[in-house]
Image (cartoon, helix red, strand yellow):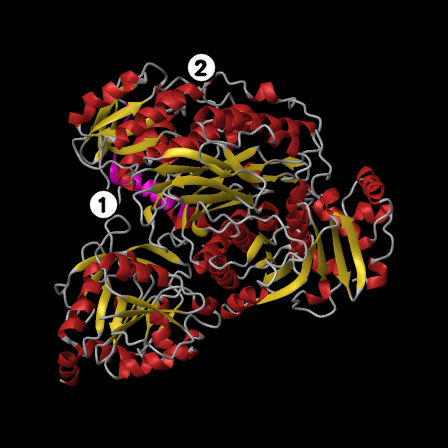
Amino acid sequence: MRWGVVTFPGSNDDHDTVHAIGAVLGEPVVPLWHEDRDLHGVDVVVLPGGFSYGDYLRPGAMARFSPIIESVATFAERGGFVWGICNGFQVLCEAGLLPGALIRNRDLRFICRMARIRVEETDTAFTCRYARSALLSLPVKHGDGCYVADHETLEQLEHNRQVVFRYVDPSGAASDRGNPNGSLANIAGICNAERNVLGMMPHPEHAVEALCGGDDALEMFKSVSQAIRQGLPHRQSLAISDR
Amino acid sequence: MMNFDEQTRTATATDAAEHGLTPDEFARICDGMGRAPNVVELAVFSVMWSEHCSYKSSRVHLKGLPTTGDHVLQGPGENAGVLDIGDGMAVSFKIESHNHPSFVEPYQGAATGVGGILRDIFTMGARPIANLNSLRFGSFDHPRTRYLVDGVVRGIGDYGNCVGVPTVGGEVYFDAAYNGNILVNAMTVGLLRADKIFRAAAAGVGNPVLYVGSKTGRDGIHGASLLASAEFSGEEEQKRPTVQVGDPFTEKLLIEACLELMEKDAIVAIQDMGAAGLTSSSVEMAGRGGTGLRLDLDRIPVRETGMTPYEILLSESQERMLIVARAGGEDIVREVFAKWQLDAEVVGEVTDDGHLEVLFRGQIAARIPVGMLTDDAPAYDRPQSEPSDFEQRQELAIDQLPLPEDYNRTLLQLLAAPNIASKAWVFGQYDHFVRSNTVVAPGSDAAVLRIKDSDKGLALSVDCNSRYCLLDPYVGAMIAVAEAARNVVCAGARPIGVTNCLNFGNPEKPEIMWQFAQAVSGIRDACVALGTPVTGGNVSFYNETEGRAIPPTPTIGMVGLLDSVSHHTTQWFKQEGDIVVLLGRGREEIGGSEYLALVHGRVAGTPPWVDLSLEQRLHKVCLKAITEGLIASAHDISEGGLAIALAECCITRPEGALGAVIDLEPAMRADAFLFGESQSRILVSLERRHLARLRDIAAAAPFDIQVLGEVRGRRLRIHPHVDVDVSELREAWTTALPRYMDKGNE
């Protein structure tokens, strides 16, 4: 299997993501350039964090027009795994691959700190190795991480169990106190209805080594590897969303 | 703006005065040139001979600093210093001021300060891996302080976050003495291969000179060079157009493009365009190489039409670099920069006549011997005199100070003081995770980064207590070096090198010059004693408004090396039952302390006594104990003294606060015991079974240690004076700064 990590002009965590996959997880990883249309046969595409195009206009609004995004959309349509982290999540929303939008944080400032999140769904390729309701510590670092969507979209997300991660307080409750940026329903990450595209604001690539920021997210990377090897789980989950 | 004929007309003494040159300096120019310069040439002289670019008041003093040592691969004189850290790796690092622009326009001033120091580092061939900063603001009573804090912090954050370099540490102080002149000192550390250092000495007659990066606009003309070379007079609003405007996105592309180009065989020399832009970068490259340089201004990428030679030469537009390529290397440069969507134009060539020659529309707009602009620039040994109130300031009758009635209250008051309170409000706006090297994030004595593909780590700290420096600049500067070193020692690292940012008032005043000379001597003596050479830095004079100077503020940036990053140590207590041991011994001294300023409203006395050989022994003891695995936590005792250090050990633990019980008979006034800031002290905690070994190490040094008590419970008890619940301490410490910052919005 092979991972692909996209670099847009202004991507920062591309390096970190490649490090997490290559050096820590020990799996093959290919850097993908934003002007490429060829995904070089990868099994999963990661859109990393950073400030693609300097966040000009809106975060993700320019990157969404990069040539590679067309290929990523086709790849996703065919069931390929796409993982958007932070700026990557913003790009996925701008590109219409995920519903909703990410706007300025509630207190209008960039925030950088460890956040507590709860794994809401384990039947995705990204979380299949976690226990339901597992509590993880992951860094958040963003200025525009407040997830918003209209009422109908939110209902659908909840109904289809597309909310994969929620911010929680130290007791594990999805309270206002545990919400770092004002996201609707404490949403930290969502997947599409087909469950093969995930967007999340917290940074799993910064949480794979005990020495640097802890390793609570290592199982996320391992989940994806396992899902690809076993051909799981998006086909299964299609059935869930049809219910 | 003047047309070409006006610019090439012969300059007069009046023009010279308008450009900040003295009559003597103008005469010297005419003499050296053998004629009067034209207006463009005069402008070139004015920026190159400005205090900011020429170091004319400081050069004679800086020569005394130790700049060599086992680790030094590059000392002062290049864009940044470089230290060898073994395994074929090296670090490049430097600190620089952006004080004046940040006061005039805090957001852009601070942002471009970060941008400028980043360029100095990647110019050396290093991948920037960490930013730090030292910030000084006025008192919160001053109406402008909140605005400045907010703008500077956002500026630093937005720039550093966007370029993808973690901001891992720094210091923030508040003092009314900075009401009219804030300080923004930015430091960057980069990692490179020891055998791949890039330098900025032009070479090879006929080699092409390439301009890369952003286009040149009319922003920042006379920005850093002249804005930073004169006092403020209360008309700062009008100077806003001289502040440069930053674009971190372009900087990010420039970093990637330059580092990618450096992997190929195309570069002879590379230099960033900082203060005085194209002028200083071309002159400095030619000066270092002993060559000449011809520039054709018609080929400079400009973002506005009708720009004159004067404007193009002096523009301080950001995110630009100058590269001397090997002949035939132009296409490689163009190809790499095209990939990153940046301009790369051949704008001139290296010549052999030792002159800077500037062409505009086929005519010579300026022609100046390079040596006059560099080595032969004026250097002044300005008169010095001890300030008349120097001795008076040091007077402090400690016996006449009333003792606090309630030590719990005093402790809480100190914890909530802006200078001691948690700075999470500030560093919580900076990305400190990016690049996945951060082992110890902001909030301990020093930041620690691991070096990928090796066992090594770096510990980084920036320090200065300017109150000490005001009371005695020599001792204060020594303490700044000692404390910065102590901080990296607490993190488990051996201090290996220093960069400094010397912030002072107007050097034309003998009292300021005296402070400067004293501080440089203090840095010299401390760096010699602690074996930490100075590899570069920056001097910022004229930090004065309406004749009032800032306290002398020689900021020290320290780099420490951990041979094994697994030895990294943090300041907070780890577990109940560990014993608390003081390495060192307090003296009855409260001169210059935060306690004296906050509780008694006085900045007086002599700064704490410091003995560098004692300090050195402390470092040895602490490092040996850490590398032997004895130590659970180590924390430097600084502002607020022993009581504050103990409180910080209790409350900064990320997993939740721990209490401590301290039982020691103080042989001095209780306030001096609790809040005095005696130097050369580190507070450690360890398992009881390691105590005997620690005693052996200390005895061999020899060095004094004392068992103070034990980590236990949920209260901090310092018998018989202090007894407070740790959650109350934590509350006071964490909520203070957000409360100060939000006040303006109520």
Q: Which residue is mark 1?
A: B655
Task: Give the residue pinned by disc 2.
Answer: B399
Instruction: Say if residue B134 shows up in the picture.
Output: no
Q: Are marks 2 and 1 in contact (CB under 8 Å)?
A: no
Residue type at mark 1? Glu
Examine the rendered structure and indicate whether residue B714 appears above or below residue B310. above
Q: Quadrant of the N terminus of chain A?
A: bottom left
Residue at (34, 40) in percent of width and height: B444
Q: Amino acid at mark 2?
A: Asp
- Left/right placement of residue B237 relative to residue B572 reads right
Q: Residue at x 38, y 26 (%)?
A: B675
Q: Position of residue A54 (x, y in %)?
A: 47, 66
Q: How many marks?
A: 2
Identify the magenta region: B721-738
Residue B735 part of the magenta-drawn span:
yes
Q: Looking at the figure, which quarter contains the C terminus of chain A?
A: bottom left
Q: Chain of mark 2?
A: B
Q: Going by the image, does B465 lie left or right of B451? A: right
Mark nearer the N terminus (2 vs 1): 2
Looking at the image, residue A136 lies above or below residue B724: below
Name the mark nearer the viewer: 2 or 1: 1
Q: Are marks 2 and 1 on the same chain?
A: yes
Instruction: Please tell me in which quadrant of the rendered image residue B471 appears.
Output: top right
Spot occupied by residue B15 in the image (x, y as percentages of width and height):
83, 49
